[in-house]
Image: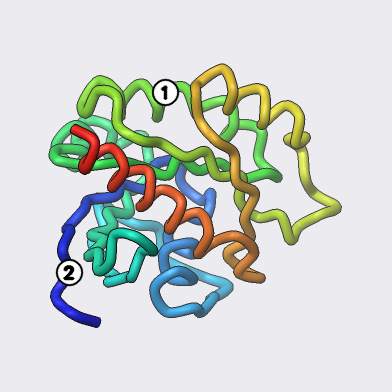
Amino acid sequence: MVEPKYVIKICLLGEAGVGKTSLVYRFIENKFRENYKQTLGVNLLKKDVDVDEYGGVSAQIWDLGGQESFKSLRKLYLEGANGGLVIFDLTDKKSFDKLSEWIESFKNARGEQPLLLIGNKSDLKNQIKIKDDEAEQFANNNNMELTITSAKTGQNVETAFIKLTKRILDKITNN
């Protein structure tokens, strides 16, 4: 790839265990591991992608630890973020109930930047607790688009990151 024309910062937001690290590794390396250690603080990753009409983009991806103990550091990590993936686990009601908190943290730090709602772990069909229409309603209420993903199978992972990247670039180039 040629030298990226754009460098963007994307933050992954959501409770511990929703699959943020699995999603980012699926996106970057197209691999899935059954067990990751919990992210302590923040994990920084980067992927260069070609995005249709925009050309080369270097996406700096900040995978934020979801534990309550890192809440005080969130504002610092969100500094300069161009957008975020707000992720919940389709099999975990608590992760869904905490979404508003994550969105509020992001908006308090960054204002109105593009956010995409991600319902992860769609491969665990028999354990799903959040119905599509409930998630869709939450997305609509928060002016977000919902994408259902599975880091394990790769379902919609690339799509979600590219969709968010396009939204960010649309906003950057239209300002």
- At 61% from the left edge and 23% from the top edge, which residue is drawn? 138
The residue type indicated by label 1 comes to Glu
Q: Secondary structure at mark 2?
A: loop
Quadrant assignment for the N terminus = bottom left
Q: Secondary structure at mark 1?
A: helix
Q: Around disc 1, counting alpha carbons within 10 Å, would you say few (fewer than 14), some (14 to 19), or many (20 or more)?
A: few
Residue 124 x/y as whole percent:
76, 57
Which residue is depicted at the point 62% across and 55% down? 149
Residue carrying label 1: 101
The label on residue 93 is none
Residue 2 at x, y percent in the picture: 19, 80
Q: CA distance from mark 1 to mark 2?
A: 33 Å
Left or right: residue 136 versus residue 109 is right
In primary-sequence order, the first of circles 1 and 2 is 2
Which residue in the protein does label 2 denote?
4
Q: Counting other residues with Cα less than 10 Å from the Cα at mark 2, is it few (<14), some (14-19), or many (20 or more)?
A: some
